[in-house]
Each structure stands twice: as C-alpha cells, then as structure tokens.
Amino acid sequence: MLKEELFSRPNPAGLVLEYVALRDIRPNEEILFDYGSLWANAWNEHVRHHSASSSDDNGNGYGSPPLNDYTPAYIMEEVATNLRTAEEQLTYPYPDNVFTACFYRYSDGNDDHYDDDKKFNAQSINTNSKTKTRAIPWKMSRGLFDMTNLRPCKVIDREPIQTGGKKMAYTAIIQNRPGLSPEEQIPKGVKHIVSGIPREAFRFVDRPYTSDVHLEGAFRQNIGLESLGVFPTAWLDLKSEE
C-alpha cells in the first residue's frame, strides 16, 4: 500500500501492519505473533509482581493508592441498567473517571430546533438573559449510532416508557464536545434538553487518561519486532552502516 493510500483513509492510524501469507491458511487455523523474549520475560515478571501485591493492594490490584472508586467505563456499561439523574448523583455519584454520553445529532433538525436555537441565542444576547432553554424529543435516524455522534450529556430525569414497566426513557442536557462540525455545535447560551432518550443511546465514557492502561503499575513493554526481521530494510532509517 502506498503512503498516499494509507493517509487517504478516514482513520489512517487504524492500520499498523499488513500481513502477507506465504502459504495457504487452513480454516480455523490460529495465527500467532511472537513478541520476542524481552517482552515475554517482562510479562512474566509483571505477573509475579501482580500476584505478590494482590494480597495487600488498595483496590486496583497493584498495591498503589486507591483511585476514588475507580471503575472502567465498560464495567459501568454492564452494571448500570438504569441511569442516575444529576440530582441523584449528588448523593450517589458515579466514579470520578467516567461520564455519560449520548448518541445525538443536533443537525437532524427535529421541529426546526436548529434554526430556533439560533434565534433563541440571538434573543438571549439582545435581552441580556443568561440562558434560553429548549426541550425536544429524541429521534432515531440512519447512522446515528456512529461514534462520531457520541457527545457528553447529563441526565436530569427518567420515566417508564410504559406504565409500570421497567424500561426507562431519559431526559438529558446535550453538550458539545471538541471536534464537532459547525452544524453540530449547540449555540452558546442554549441549554439544549432532549427527552425520550432510550438507555441504548447512552454510553459511559472514560475521562482522558483514566482508562485501565493509565493505571499506575499497568504493564508496558515494547514489542520486540526489530529482532524478528519483519521490517523491510528500506524502513530502517536509523540502521547503522556496516
């Protein structure tokens, strides 16, 4: 693959290595990759250290200080069937390392809220009002559950979808996030409230630099590709001349 083809992809960082089979691969055959002896020795040492410290740790398995009830987002996603409102979190807060996000596309234009919010924002500036509030129903649209449409949100209410039922619909304040296109940005000064959001449209998200890989004592070791001879000579710019 040419570098121009690689960088023309939507997510060029997603490609790390291309593999070329030198023989036929049988159905259900497992393909293994040797990380090298340095990696294997470092992993074995990490496992021994982890086992020795697990009896006297403080909650995260490495004997390091507790992380304010650290719970990764994927665990919260499994255990939190019903979401807490912002008011409930004053008493029963979520772990500090996670926040809630919603799949929502502001530019879908439900009931012309896109233009109305602009008018409300202009009105708030003209009247010196601090905040103008809008509340609209959530709606499903094609491609909505793409990760580019995931944005921070704060749950403020919930109610059963059916009387006496256990399945809930939520009302939330939708917020902006970095990197949104102009048409997806909620105008400044507008509290954009959306109702009727299903649980499936929410996700717990790890705050930056708080996931498992950022824990003190997490295993880190370079994969020893250099000694395996997998890189073409032309790639080895720093190879010493013989």
Image (cartoon, rainbow, N blue to C red):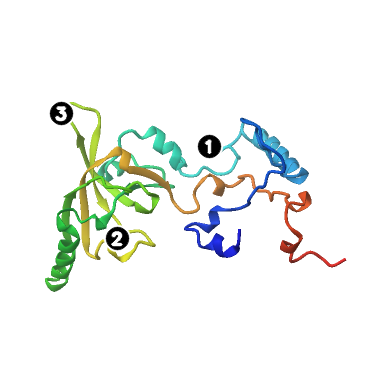
Residue at the right extreme of this rendering:
242
Above or below, 94 relative to 115: above
Q: Amino acid at mark 1?
A: Gly
State the residue at coordinates (50%, 47%).
Answer: 211
In this rendering, the label closer to the viewer, 3 or 2 = 2
Give the CA distance from mark 3 to mark 1.
Answer: 41 Å
**Which residue is labeled 2 in the image?**
184
**Which residue is labeled 1 in the image?**
59
Give the CA distance from mark 2 to mark 1.
Answer: 40 Å
Q: Nearer the viewer, residue 206 or 151?
A: 151
**Residue at disc 1, secondary structure:** loop
Q: Are marks 3 and 1 in contact (CB under 8 Å)?
A: no
Dividing the image into 4 quarters, which one contains the C terminus? bottom right
Q: Are marks 2 and 1 in contact (CB under 8 Å)?
A: no
Dividing the image into 4 quarters, which one contains the N terminus? bottom right
Q: Mark 3 or mark 2: which comes first in sequence?
A: 3
**Residue at disc 3, secondary structure:** loop
- Say few, some or many: other residues with alpha carbon within 10 Å of mark 1 (under 14 / 14 to 19 / 20 or more): some
Give the CA distance from mark 3 to mark 2.
Answer: 34 Å
